[in-house]
Image (tube, rainbow, N blue to C red):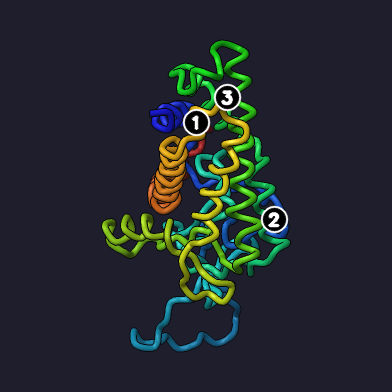
């Protein structure tokens, strides 16, 4: 219930923003180059003609479409070609939700390592949007009186907030920084991307809670991600009331954490499709307006 209320609040906050792939600055130079979204690369225009002899026209079999050249900030695939809009992961979903730990479909990811892991974890934990989400979750938890021992009103809000901050920070550093370094696991989300059936992509999203990659790219159980959540819940016994430290309560919080990650991974998987649709509609509308302006006679 709390997570649903937060999603509703985020949806209202996002309605005032344009639906486009955000071109936000990278949080760090060490972050994933392929996560930086950019507009579609256009094909290079043909060179201007000259007064020399005209080259013979190529037949349809000989003619080949030029390969688009990626712009400097365009994410590229293993062959150096620009990744389509439908497969590009922005660093911020809807312009403010952090998406630093997602790899665009088909891109060349930044190699993992302890320095990279902790850099990304720090950006994820202390990003401004994380505090917005923390405030919303604390507010809804206080409103629904989830833990009566923590109180109500301003004092209760403070009790929920600092505990929620510890939960979020502990889980981020354990699941994205420390444990992936120890187990040499890459716990980033590798988007499957457009071109696959929706059912397959949905099942893939769920499976990624249990599957990670090694530093060499092979599949492995997601020990770091799941163990990080479990350790976070165990540690929370020391700063939550005793009623929240029971096995049933900790298991419920663990399940909520897993479901929250599945929900966010679903957004990460399908957001590029929606964003690309609106980006193209906006560009088509702009092109029509430009064509109408150019067709209008000049004013005397």
Reading the image, the residue beneath label 3 is: 160
Q: Residue at x 59, y 85 (%)?
A: 52
**Picture coordinates of residue 159, whole percent (x, y):** 61, 22
Q: Quadrant of the N terminus?
A: top left
Q: Earlier in the sequence, mark 2 or mark 3?
A: 2
Observer-nearest residue: 85 or 111? 111
Q: Nearer the viewer, residue 53 or 168?
A: 168
Q: CA distance from mark 1 to mark 2?
A: 30 Å
- Tag 2: Cα neighbours inside 10 Å, few (<14), some, or many (≥20)? some
Residue 255, placed above or below residue 165: below
Q: Mark 1 falls on what kind of element?
A: helix
Q: Position of residue 68 (x, y in %)?
A: 51, 70
**Viewer-proximal residue, 43 or 288?**
43
The image position of residue 61, as x and y in percent, is 34, 87
Residue under the image location 51 percent in, 34 percent down: 245
The mark closer to the camera, 2 or 3, is 3
Badge 1 local density, few (<14 within 10 Å), some, or many (20+)?
many
In the rendered view, tell whether residue 272 sits above or below residue 113: above
User: Which residue is nearer to you in this view: 154 or 58?
Assistant: 154
């Amino acid at each position: 219930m709390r997570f649903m209320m937060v999603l509703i609040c985020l949806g209202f906050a996002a309605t005032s923003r344009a639906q486009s792939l955000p071109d936000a600055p990278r949080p760090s130079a060490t972050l994933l180059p392929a996560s930086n979204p950019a507009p579609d690369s256009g094909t290079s225009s043909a060179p201007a003609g000259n007064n020399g002899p005209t080259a013979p026209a190529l037949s349809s079999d000989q003619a080949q479409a030029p390969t688009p050249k990626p712009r400097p900030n365009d994410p590229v695939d293993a062959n150096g070609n620009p990744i389509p809009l439908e497969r590009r992961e922005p660093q911020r979903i809807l312009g403010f939700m952090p998406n630093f730990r997602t790899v665009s479909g088909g891109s060349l990811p930044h190699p993992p390592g302890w320095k990279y892991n902790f850099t990304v974890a720090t950006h994820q934990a202390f990003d401004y949007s994380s505090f917005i989400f923390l405030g919303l979750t604390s507010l809804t938890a206080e409103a629904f009186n989830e833990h009566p021992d923590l109180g109500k009103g301003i004092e209760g809000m403070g009790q929920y907030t600092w505990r929620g901050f510890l939960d979020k920070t502990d889980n981020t550093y354990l699941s994205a920084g420390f444990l992936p370094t120890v187990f040499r696991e890459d716990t980033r989300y590798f988007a499957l991307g457009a071109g696959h059936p929706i059912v397959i992509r949905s099942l893939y999203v769920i499976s990624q809670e249990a599957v990670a990659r090694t530093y060499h790219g092979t599949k492995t159980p997601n020990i770091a991600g799941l163990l990080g959540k479990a350790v976070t819940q165990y540690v929370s016994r020391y700063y939550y009331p005793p009623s929240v430290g029971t096995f049933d309560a900790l298991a419920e919080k663990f399940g909520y954490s897993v479901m929250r990650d599945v929900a966010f991974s679903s957004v990460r998987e399908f957001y590029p499709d929606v964003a690309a649709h609106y980006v193209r509609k906006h560009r088509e509308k702009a092109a029509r307006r430009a064509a109408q302006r150019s067709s209008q006679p000049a004013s005397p």
